[in-house]
Image: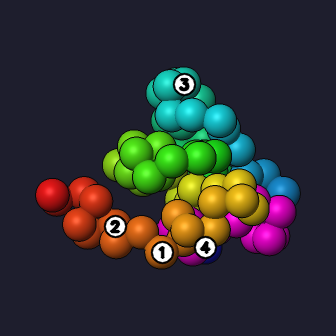
Amino acid sequence: MPEIAVEGELELPEDTLVLDSVEDVAALRQAYDQGRPVVVRAETADGVRTALARPEVSSVLVPPGRRDLLELDLTALTYD
């Protein structure tokens, strides 16, 4: 599964937990502990960084209008 994908263009496994944020830590942990993929929606570079900082998150979905987020330099975003 790619780290960042456009919502609607990635075929997700049936048991994927899709969240709008990483605020529900209990749901993240439970899905991860059950071996379920966790995908989070994000509309900004900071939202992508925040979601991918969580070890439970498999991928981030961005809106079709924010394809620019597919080109983020995740290393620079994380360590700058």
Disc 4/disc 2 C-alpha distance (Å): 16 Å
The residue tagged 2 is 74
Q: Earlier in the sequence, mark 1 or mark 3?
A: 3
Q: Residue at x 54, y 24 (%)?
A: 24
Residue 76 rendering spot, x and y as whole percentages? 23, 66
Q: Residue at x 63, y 60 (%)?
A: 66
Three-letter residue code for mark 1: Glu
The residue tagged 3 is 24
Residue interval drawn in magenta = 2-13
Disc 4/disc 1 C-alpha distance (Å): 16 Å
The residue tagged 4 is 1
The residue tagged 1 is 71
Three-letter residue code for mark 2: Leu
Residue 29 rendering spot, x and y as whole percentages? 49, 35
Front: mark 4 or 2: 2
Front: mark 3 or 2: 2
Q: Residue at x 40, y 45 (%)?
A: 46
As drawn, is 31 to the left or to the right of 47? Answer: right
